[in-house]
Amino acid sequence: MEDMIFYDRLQFAFTITFHYIFPQLTMGLSLMIVYFKWKFLRTKIDKYNNAAKFFMKIFAINFTMGVVTGIPMEFQFGTNWAKFSELTGGIIGQTLAMEGMFSFFLESSFLALFIFGEKLMGQKLHFLTGFLVFLGSWASGWFILATNAWMQHPVGYEILDNGKFVLENFSTLFTNPWLLPAFLHNQLASVVTSSFVVASIGAFYVLRNKQTEYGRLFLKTGVVFGLISSVLVAFPTGDWNAKNVAEYQPAAFAAMEGIFETEEAGAEIVLIGQPNMVEKKLDNKIAVPNILSFLTHQDWNKQIPGMDQFKEEELPDNIPALYYSYHIMVGLGTIFIGVMALALFFLWRKKLYTIKPLLWTIMFLVPFPYIANLTGWYTAELGRQPYLVYGLLKTSDGISPTVSSGNTLFTLLGFVALYMLLGLLFLVLVGKTINHGPKPQTH
Amino acid sequence: MEVFWYIAIALVLAVFFTLDGYDFGAGIIHLFFAKKEKDKEVIAKSAGLFWDSNEVWLVAAGGMLFMAFPTFYASVFSGFYLPLILVLWLIIFRAIGLEFRGQFKYQMWKDIWDASFGVSSLLLALFFGIALGNVVRGVNLGGVENGASAYEGHYFFLPLWDSSFSPLSDTPGIIDWFTIIIGLISVVTLAIHGANWVILKTNSSINTKLKGVIFKLNIALTALTVFSLIVWQIVNPNSLDNFIERPYLIVFPIVYFTGLIGLFFIKTFKKENQGFMFSTLLIVGGITSSLASLFPVILPSINNTHEHLTIYNTAAEHYGLSVAFNWAIIGFILLIVYFIVQKRLMGGKVDKMDYGH
């Protein structure tokens, strides 16, 4: 039984991690494509239009990857988490089915139109199709986050005698207090990823001294979008989410902040340190007193319950992983703000394109926003443990009763092998597209 | 409400098999009949341009099934665990094949990914047929052995096959001689459908030859259909009851047979889309007839301990279904609009279309 749950969780974690590499780029990138296209409509300068079309190619590759890795996500609700699906399908099935119907179709139909239809439609309609792709991809995020918000903070339900969750109020699925902060935080984080990708491609073009005009445009756009989104991810949306966790999942909050013991008055904020699960304390910790209480409650001396206040079975089952995920996300987010602020400063002083160390840094920083996005999700999902539906349905009660651990291990290994191949394909396709670059500028 | 959702999901599934069916079929045709590089390339393109927007329909069907019939979703997806994961892998392999083949100019490189595309398409067609065969035949719900249930009455787990390979066994596997027959019907039907698609969408040099292929495949399909109808009665003796009780349901088999008969005249068709229309009738008629023969059952139980899964005992609660009815109507209208817009723009032959770079 224990290893059944372990393999089911591992397979879901692996496949969702791989899947989320793709949508996190497409959501943010679609916004930037809309920006380039809009800029072209305003200025009639070709390079903006070419930039929009170039990034739509990269978008399309990512979208395809998102489709083939997304179908397994939907299937796994049934294949590996049958009991969870049976009990909650009447509720989260709503938001998942709406995602398919209202966002997926929108995105895929208008993506094809954007790529093939520019000559047929004229520029204004072409802009509109781009905008609809953006709308579809963000709607997708909205419905997925609504699903997740219900699992983090269930609302509008009733539980029948047989354990089934029944929908009682449809609109509460979307007015869930968890949803809006999580959605905004997630979408802005996806803009961070796309900004870094755009800026990184720009840095690459400038550094290799080919297509430098596009390189400069991408750098400039990436840095401006990057700084704005990096700041907004931290404040107000990140702050808002943390307050939600503190309010609705205090046990998870204590674990992710690394508070083992409750302090009489005012909790310190841990900057760094290693959870020691045997002695229940943080080793080698560097912390600043009272800051956490202030950040969470705007009160320096407010008490924040530590992990000692909760029963063992209410606490997340992997506290170190949760703690590290959260701190990696926050740490990286801080670095992003720093790098982008520096880049913007030199952009303003008109020196950015000549400072090579900074350009190299921007180019090679590109994996890190992905890591920050994923560790952010790990924080949310590990924090929700040991529950699938917070406080109501245990993870161990959600797995398929008929699928053995051997079966899941077999399919997990298969997914690992296949996704390596898929990852290779992705790198080849994106690499070729980037190397080829946008349509050369005609003067 | 249950009936509305049943029909809606059946409709979405029929659209999925009609649309993705042609690119599975194109893969089968590609595997067996395309010899020249130019033909291979254009056939791969006729699938490659469309497969991902077609697979969106599978996602939609999955989501709707999850929402409306969660118990059925949970039961079937976990019960058919291995074949479903294999289907996922094949879908990915197909995608890799289609997207990889044009990346390098070496002939061997293309051959490898052509094989990946073709074989995955063939196996997917076979698997989907086998899946339908399993649903018609029924499964050992509750995992009953010697009168004792291993699971709750709406769960089951099938081995890939049972040593008897017989659908009449107490513990039939996923593969038995009956499900293989349905699998073959699916392969032949989709091959015909794919051939019609290639004729409709490309100027390949084998278009004329494909008409002969369709004619021959159609003879095979007729033989398989007749044979399957006979054994169907053995496997599921009640399958005609619905048609006797509700005679209007006969319209679905009529649709199927219209397609079947129509395709014998393939060589006389003047317009290139006529063949495609008839094979669409085959697919839509085949799926709807099978579902209609079971209604309202969606997964029969082969033991007497546990009752069949029906649309009533697996559905979500009424409130959820009615709320979803409201948004689904809006959703379907939007789908029709997108579909028309897209078809108008992507019409015509694919030979000249720009694919990727």
Image (tube, coloured by chain):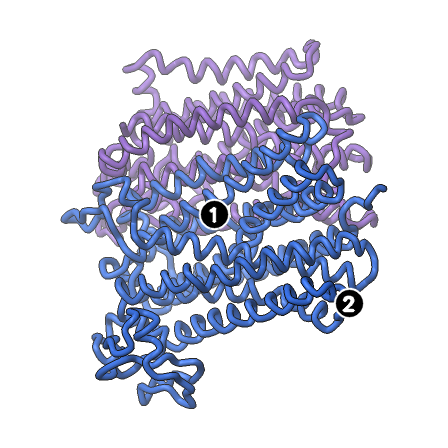
Chain colours: A blue, B purple
A117 up-or-down from B159: above or below: above
Q: Quadrant of residue A424?
A: bottom right
Residue furthest to the left in view is A161
Please state the chain letter of the residue tagged with numbered disc 1 in the rendered image: B
B311 up-or-down from A373: above or below: above
> Across the whole image, how many numbered discs are drawn on residues?
2
On residue A348, the disc is none
Q: Amino acid at mark 2?
A: Thr
The foreground one among B333 and B76 is: B333
Marks 1 and 2, how far apart at CA: 56 Å
Q: In the image, what residue occupies the spot 81% across and 54% down?
A: A211
Q: In the image, what residue occupies the spot 28% across and 15% down?
A: B245
Label 1 neighbour load within 10 Å: few <14, some 14-19, many 20+: some
Which label sits in the foreground, 1 or 2? Answer: 2
Q: Quadrant of residue A367?
A: bottom right
Q: Secondary structure at mark 2?
A: helix
Q: Secondary structure at mark 1?
A: helix
The foreground one among B268 and A328 is: A328
Q: In the image, what residue occupies the spot 30% across and 26% down?
A: B3
User: Residue under circle 1?
Assistant: B83
Please state the chain letter of the residue tagged with numbered disc 2 in the rendered image: A
User: Residue under circle 2?
Assistant: A354
Q: Percent x, y for residue A167?
A: 24, 42
The foreground one among B279 and A283 is: A283
Q: Percent x, y for residue A126?
A: 64, 32
